[in-house]
Image (spheres, rainbow, N blue to C red):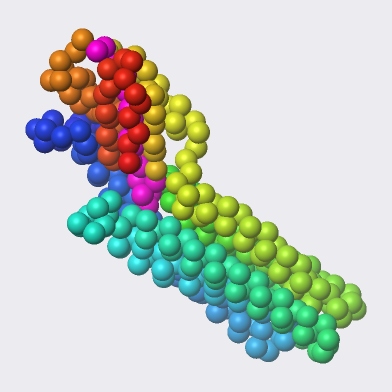
Amino acid sequence: MARARHVVSEVLGAHSHDAADQIDAALEADNNGRRALLISLAILGVTAAIQLVVVGFSGSVALLGDGLHNVADALTAVPLLVAFRLARRPATKRYTYGYGRAEDLGGLFVIAMIALSSALAAFEAVDRLLHPRDVTDLWAVALAAVVGFAGNEFVARYRIGVGRRIGSAALVADGLHARTDGFTSLAVLIGAAGVALGWKDADPIVGIVITLAILGVLRSAIRQVGARLLDAVDPALVDQATAAVTSVRGITEVRSIHIRWIGHTLRAELDATVDPSLTVTEAHDLAHHAERHLLGQISRLTAATIHTSPAGAHAHEPT
């Protein structure tokens, strides 16, 4: 905790300060995010390859839908890797907040790939219902379904865990996508059992069920990524930040607060009320102290700006 309160900003003389430990944490988050994407890309690539090979000699349209979904899920790692790399670039005069929001654009690509995979799965399932064909090698289809479930569940747990730890909405959305793939793999297993029992339409019907499951995860991903693009944060985070600042002696209240995600780090701007008898220098020093306290209390907060207003003045709205 001592390191968590270390600040490199005191000599900068401005109202925006970066805690050294939070910068280190942001860099570590980048590394963890890229590692999660590379590992999941490899696992899902192998899983999809096994499934599509089995599709080639079995003719299972349900397994084809699951395999296509796995291919799409694996490919979503590519734009997210690019986004994570872009996020490491320093801010410029044009992009004064840096490139952290590139990660959210990567989340839009994830959504597009989920939508595409659902459309392809639906088309193949309906086509098979209209033009029935026998499914062979059911034992191989069943084995490929189990492989699909195991691979996707591992990747889902890994991505969601890392995404929540580093604050990456795009990575969490990608993990939810993988989790749905796992359950759709189990649906393929059910379809293979149905065909084995003599119900020939079981395979394409399961393909349609898979499509509906994909649409469900699409809705969840849209909500997750859309909220991030609209600068949504957990209301509890606002309460925590307000409590951290008002706990500083000399700060009487927080009149306005703005918190936003930039990639998987946070930035905050606040207007705090202080005693009107304070000198400019005293108010300035108090703002410094409150900023340091805030940076030490809020996880993944890398920058904060606190404006101090004398009691009775109009509220300052940071831009």
Q: Is residue 270 magenta?
A: yes
Name which residue lies at 28% across and 51% down.
97
Q: Check the picture and name the quadrant holding the C terminus.
A: top left
Q: Check the picture and name the quadrant holding the N terminus.
A: top left
Name which residue lies at 68% across and 89% down.
57
Name which residue lies at 45% across and 46% down.
231
Of the pair 126 and 186, the residue shown nearer to us: 126
Q: Position of residue 164 (x, y in %)?
A: 47, 46
Which secondary structure type mostly characterizes the magenta part of the structure? strand
Q: Is residue 107 left or right of residue 16?
A: right
Q: Position of residue 161 (x, y in %)?
A: 48, 48
Across the whole image, how many numbered discs are drawn on residues?
Answer: 0
Q: Is residue 317 visible?
A: yes
Q: Position of residue 3 (x, y in %)?
A: 23, 31
**Dividing the picture into quarters, in which one does residue 133 lie?**
bottom right
Residue extending furthest toward the left: 11
Region rendered in magenta: 261-276
Name which residue lies at 15% across and 15% down.
279
Above or below for 67 versus 18: below
Q: Is residue 91 left or right of residue 80?
A: left
Q: Position of residue 258 (x, y in %)?
A: 39, 36
**Dividing the picture into quarters, in which one does residue 152 lie?**
bottom right
Q: Is residue 211 left or right of residue 269?
A: right
Q: Is residue 41 magenta?
A: no
